[in-house]
Amino acid sequence: MRSNGFWAGGAVLLLLFLCMLYPLLAVITNIFLPGLFFGEVNYTGFGLLLELFDRPLWRQSLTNSLTLGLGTAFLGTLLGSLLAILRSQWSFRASRLLDVSAWVLLIVPSFMIAQGWVLFAGSGGLANQWLGWTWLTELIFQPFGLILVMSLCKFPLAYLAVTAALEWNVSQYGDAAKLNGGGPLTVWRTVHLPLSLPAITAGWTLVFMDTIGDFGLPAALATVYRFPTLPYSIYTAIYQSPVRFDMAGVLALYLVAILAVAMAILFFALRKSRVDFLTSRAVVQAPKPSRYSGLMSAVVLLVLVVAVGIPVGTSISTSLLKQLGGGLTWANLTLDHYISLFRVDPGEHRTLPLLTGMRNSFLIAGMAAIISMALGFLTSYVVTFTRFRFKSLIHLSTVLSLAVPGVVLGIGYIFVWNQRWLEQVGLHLYGTPTLLVMAAIAGAIPYAVRLQIGAFAKIPASMLNAAAMQGAGTVRRMKDILLPLVRGGLLTATLASFGTSVYDLAIASILKPPNYTLVPLVIDKAFEFSQYGYATAATVFSGTIVILLLLLGSWLGKRWLS
């Protein structure tokens, strides 16, 4: 019989509350009771909420965020859906490369992609210097251009959602429509589109939420183009003098409210457009050969060259050039930027900033990956195999942590953990790396849970029930039954959590301890001071190390599984 999972469910809910729900509630509470978390209670009413319409910067930030979010959601979902349909219906040579590139874009942080576009399309960038494309600067550095760049960065979210929905072939419905006189357009409009609508809606919502909460793009553009968004304005409110946590809280509330509306639209659309179409006749979709496969490969390669090749290629090229405007000649090629990563000024007694940042970032990401993997294991167990009363709240919390931006989460951590009484009881975590680990866990939980819960769903409960009848306790059942069956999911969740935690610029910027170096801050600071060679060399070097670590972890994991 299924247990109520009280202890496991309670532990999971407590950890999720501390890492996610409590900081979010603190942000909302601080708007109406500013100073509550710092020993002062001052009720200010709802007046500060209405100042959004009186402050030009706040109003512009809201407008920019909505413009960027909605535009990217529509264009990114359109691109991702079309590529997913192309990938699932027909076979062509570039299909595997499309899958790999989608995961690369999903893991690489947006501020690195944006930096590559700045170096390529800026007034002094490679496109202007090498190709004479002066028109590209005006195209990219305006709202439509930013929507285009973000769409090329975020379309994998829609691509993966729609691809998963097209896994099964149910062509009999389309065949029935054709037998009743329906043409190709009618069949697509009345059969295929309704069946794919829930996945398209989910992809649209994911792209919108990820875009509107993005901090990396405005941070990278700040040096060349002023485009304030809500996440960036929240960050500046914290670091202005005097610090205005109440203003940051108001902007965070508006951002969370927009994300809540997006999630509500998703749930409503999924409920209204629910279609149960799988029958015994459904088979796994097998892409068909086409005489236009060469054209399909060319189109996909063109998209990937623009989406991946331009930003990544620009960063690699810049890291190897003495001067950005010197052209691609032997005389202008150099390894000095990479050598500078390991060079210390003789007059200064300090460690190398990049290597120190990599050590700290990898340590934090590694701890967060292991803990989030274990937490994801427990969460999947509670949701799948127990009758814990609040498991729906647990499931909602894991989804919520995917939607809440790192900027909002960072402010909540300041409110919760920067309090005098915590220091008296030995829990003053603000200004310590521990808080960075907790924030990284909160960001990695959605991936850890999503990548494991599918594996848990395939395990019949009868296995655990039989073991329980033989006297095996909960820990014994987890160790001897569940763990061997979901090892692959555990490995994937750990690697994904590590890869997504290394370059979290928002959390690093807000919660870093004094004199504590992290790799995204090293790269962002060098880029901010126009040290493009050093910034790109640090990006390429650290990114290569991350990829090698992931490959090594995957290889060791496969040996463990074999």
Image: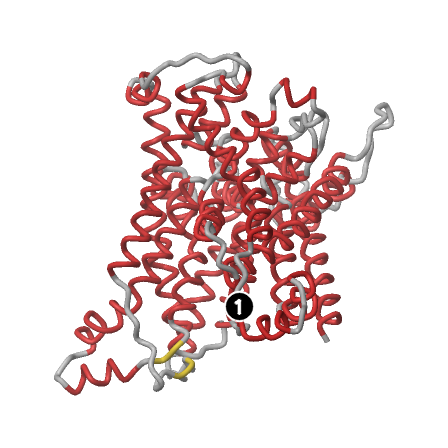
Q: Is residue 80 above or below residue 508?
A: below
Q: Mark 1 is on which residue type?
A: Met
Mark 1 highlights which residue? Answer: 1
- Near-viewer residue (199 or 394): 394
Label 1 neighbourhood size at 10 Å, few (<14), some (14-19), many (20+)? few
At horizontal 68% and vertical 28% (from top left) the residue drawn is: 427
On the image, the x and y values in percent for residue 13 come to: 54, 45
- Describe the element under mark 1 as helix, strand or loop: loop
Residue 552 vs residue 29, the one in the foreground: 29
Give above or below for 98 relative to 333.
below
From the top left corner, tell me how far across and down residue 480 is, in percent: 69, 69
In this rendering, is residue 282 above or below 393?
below
| Residue under the point 49% across and 66% down | 98
Whether residue 10 can be seen here: yes
Q: Quadrant of the C terminus?
A: bottom right
Using the rendered view, name the quadrant where residue 349 is placed. top right
Q: Residue at x 75, y 66 (%)?
A: 556
Please say whether residue 309 is visible from this viewpoint: no
Q: Position of residue 148 (x, y in %)?
A: 38, 48
Determine whether, in the image, residue 68 is placed left or right of residue 351: left
- Residue 529 falls in which quadrant of the image? top right
- In terms of depth relative to the viewer, which is nearer, 448 or 347? 448
